[in-house]
Each structure stands twice: as C-alpha cells, then as structure tokens.
Amino acid sequence: MSEPRKIVIVGAGLGGASAAAAVRERGFGGEILLLGSEPHRPYELPPLSKGVLLGNADEPDWVHEEKFYAEKDIRFGAGVTATRIELGARLVVDDAGGEHHYDRLLLATGSRPRRLPVPGGDLPGLYTLRTLDDALKLRSAFAAAERVLIIGAGWLGSEAAAAARTHHAEVTVVDPVPVPLANVVGETVGAVFRDLHIANGVRYRLGEQVAEITGGPDGVRGVRLGTGEELTADVVLVAVGAAPRVELAHAAGLELSDNGGVAVDAALRTAAPEVYAVGDIAANFHPRFGRRIRVEHWANAKDQGTHVAQNLLGGNEPFLASPYFFTDQYDLGCEYRGLADPAADELVIRGDLAAREFTAFWLREGQVAAAMNVNMWDDGDALGALVDGHTKVTADQLKTADLASLV
C-alpha cells in the first residue's frame, strides 16, 4: 500500500485530533484536513461533567494548544460539517459546498445525547450535556436553580447530580433501574454509588419511568411519572446515554454493526477501501473479546485515534487496548479497566465497600474480565496487567495476595 497524499478526518473531537497529531508524528508529509462541526478547537469531554460543571474550570482540557494545528500544518476546519461521502469518488462534501478528495478517510464523528421518546421530549429549555457550550449553560442553570431533576442514573447523570449538589440545588434522579449503574457494575457496587449520593442529599426515584416531560412553549416545568405523579423542577437534565453519529457513514453505504456503530475490523478499517473509523462510532472487532465492541469512553477515542495513524499510513496493526474510564463524584474517585458482564461474572471485592475504599474484580472462567479501583491508587499497573494478561487467578488470591505478584 502506497503512502497517501491527503488524509481527511471527519470529526474534530479527541479521536480525530489525536489521529491527526499521530499521523504527523509518524513523519507524514502530505495534506491533513480535520473537519469539526463545533466552533471550538478539539477538546476532551470528561472535564465537562467534572471541573467545568462543578465551577472549578471555565475551559475543558484542550487536546492541543491553539497554535498546534498551524505549526503542524494540519488544516483545521472549525464549524464545518461533512454532509456527504462519495466512496467511489473518494470525496467528502461539507455544508459550505466544499469538496474534499481523499486518499485515506477517517470517520470520528462521535455521539449525540439520546432524547427521551416521551411527550415533551423536545420542549425548549430541556438540558442535555455533550459539548462545552452545554456544560457552561448547565453550570449557570445549576447555580441559579433550587430544584434540579435528572433523568438517568448512569455515569453522566451521577456526575451531574454531584455537581448540582455542589451548587446547593435540591436534586432528584429518576431511572427505571433498581440501582444506579447496575448494568455496568452490578447492584452490589452500584449500591455504593447510590448510598454516596444519598449521603450527599440526592433523592432517588428508582424503578420509575418518566411518562412525560411537562411544560410548554415557555419551557420545562418538570416530569410526570408513570404512576401519574408530577415532579416539578427549575432544571431538567436528560442523561439517558449517547447515540453514535453514524448517519453520514450509513448514507454513504458503510456497514453498521448490531451495536449501532460503524463496522470495522481489528485494524479499525471499514469494508470500504481506505476508510477507517475510531471512537464512539467504531464497532471494532477486538481479538481479546472475539467480537465487535463499541466503547464510548475518553480513553478509547484517544487510544484509537493514536493507534489508527499507523494504519492510515499503510499498516495493519490490530487495536488491542482494553476499555478504560474514570469518574470523580464528591470524595469518590475510581478507575475501571476491562469489560464486565455483571449479570454473569463473579464479583470479588478486595477492601472495604462501606468505607468506599476497595477494588472490585469481575471474574470470568478464572480470569479477570474487569477491575475497578475505588479511592485506592497503588495498584493501577497491576490491575491493567491482570485484565490484559488473561492470568488465571482465584477469588481468594484477588482478596489477599499482593496483586503485582499475580501478574
């Protein structure tokens, strides 16, 4: 495969920006075009629901300094949205009528917040959180609100609840799940987060559905539950997950996977010649799991963006990194590595759940499928090695042994 002369990257988030930088770092001397719909230069998303929403920062973590793109001769089109891909002609068309031919194309279009499919789900004044502008608006709303209602008890909803309480608002979280985060970490570990939020004044309405978002042209008034009960609030945040932005890829004829992403192989390559995908939209075949997975977390976008650079330049290296994410809520911080099935895997706890100082392991056929350290920071390397290494271990070893010795 010959080296390309022009690489077009659609999506100027962490994945796209990381890929552009890594291609240059590998000595590519051709043209790089990075198209991004937002007016801002590329930034990382985790600080939005943490430092920015808490009021500890007014800016996110920028992927690169403002001068970086000019210095590296990366043509950055801010506020430019790709509207059509013609695979046969190897052409990207944007919303300003620009036409961009490519030798290699990388799709890194990210995700958008899911809407709640209920009456009132599109009312003006309903908040979501995905962009820097979203975070700044929501922070101002939290600071002025007496009552905040959050629909969704996942990671984003939980971090937003912590931020709203820090701004001294009354907070109610509604979700049909029995325990927050149960689908990711199971009910035992999820209960730790529930109890943490309750201790900080959050009210939960778990096991309940939102039937309607109430209000009118002037804005949102609250929600009506499936029971008919109405809850009023100054601010209503919908945090029910994110949907991958695959419309552009689908319209071009690229294959979508069962999990909603763009189907790519282990090297992050689609079935179309010279077209790749990374980040939230990439449903990549992962050799370690033997199936396609799609991961929406920060590290996945960063790592896949950096990794795909070698393949854009002619390589064929599989992406093997395990999923990773982190969260900070009140005085609790944790890191998660791997990919657990909490309904089927064996949960092993090392440490003290009640004190919120522990490591949780999920064992599958005697191997660590995932590990999460909560307020314990000394064993990160060992946890990563246990997840990645397919090491055979027992529950007793995980509870008592020196973890580094098990690697």
Image (cartoon, helix red, strand yellow):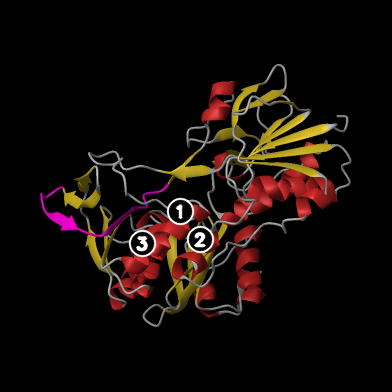
Q: Earlier in the sequence, mark 1 or mark 2?
A: 2
Residue 134, disc: 1
Disc 2 to disc 3, how far (Cα)? 14 Å
Which dot, 1 or 2, sits closer to the camera?
A: 1
244 relative to 77 in the view: left or right: left
Residue sitting nearer the eye, 367 or 31: 31
- Amino acid carrying label 2: it is Leu
Relative to residue 215, is residue 202 depicted above or below? below
Farthest residue, direction front: 218
Q: Residue 4's image quarter?
A: top right
Residue 48, disc: 2
Image quarter of the N terminus: top right
76 relative to 52 in the view: left or right: right
Q: Is residue 230 magenta?
A: yes
- Amino acid carrying label 1: it is Asp
Residue 141, disc: 3
Farthest residue, direction top: 88
Residue displayed at 89% across by 41% down: 29
- Amino acid carrying label 3: it is Ala
Residue 390 % position (x, y): 62, 58
Residue sitting nearer the eye, 296 or 91: 91
- SS label for mark 2: helix
Q: Residues within 10 Å of mark 2 (few under 14, many from 20)?
A: many
Disc 1 to disc 2, how far (Cα)? 9 Å
- SS label for mark 1: helix
Q: Which residues are magenta?
A: 226-241
